[in-house]
Amino acid sequence: MHAQPVQLTDEEVAGRLRIAVNRLQRRLRQESLGGLSPAQASALGSVHRHGSPTLGELAAIEQVQPPTMTRVVASLAEAGMVTRVADAHDRRSARVRATPLGERALERMRTRKNAFLLRRLGELGPDEQRHATELVTLLEHLLEES
């Protein structure tokens, strides 16, 4: 005997979705950091996505103050994850690039996140797995630019 689904208001759905997405993101971050702080992991991912941003661009992307980003990048550089190179157009400015070690760290983080999700999805029954597939499609649709 199945219970009737509880009817939620749009506001309740939005709130529960926000909380669930935040919890999932936090859990994935916990699964994957591999010795990096959340700030380091986020900055390394942004460097990878944006190619070779300046420290100022990276601070803006990460929404932190430039001195904070300078410290994060210094710690990543010390760990061998990124390197700073002079800007070809403005020698006073440095750009940040991920090193091969940094790229491998990012790949390990992605692999750990996927492994966690695969384990959890494997615990679902066939109907739940189908719903999970539908949910992914729905979330992608919600994130499309309009």
Image (cartoon, rainbow, N blue to C red):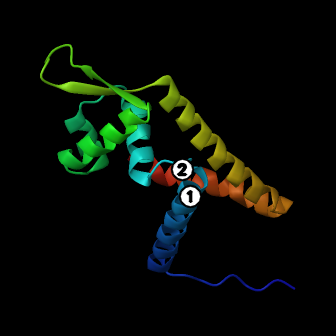
Q: Residues within 10 Å of mark 2 (few under 14, many from 20)?
A: many
Picture disc at residue 59: none
| Residue identifier under label 2 | 33
Residue at the front extreme of this rendering: 78
Q: Nearer the viewer, residue 81 or 11?
A: 81
Q: Are marks 2 and 1 in contact (CB under 8 Å)?
A: yes
Q: Is residue 94 visible?
A: yes
User: What residue do we see at 69% from left, 53% from top?
Assistant: 116
User: What residue do we see at 31% from left, 38% from top?
Assistant: 74
Separation of disc 2 and disc 1 at Cα? Answer: 6 Å
| Residue identifier under label 1 | 30
Q: Percent from the top left, x then y, of residue 111?
A: 65, 41
Question: Quick one: SS at disc 2?
Answer: loop
Q: Is residue 130 visible?
A: no
User: What residue do we see at 14% from left, 17% from top?
Assistant: 91
Amino acid identity at mark 1: Gln
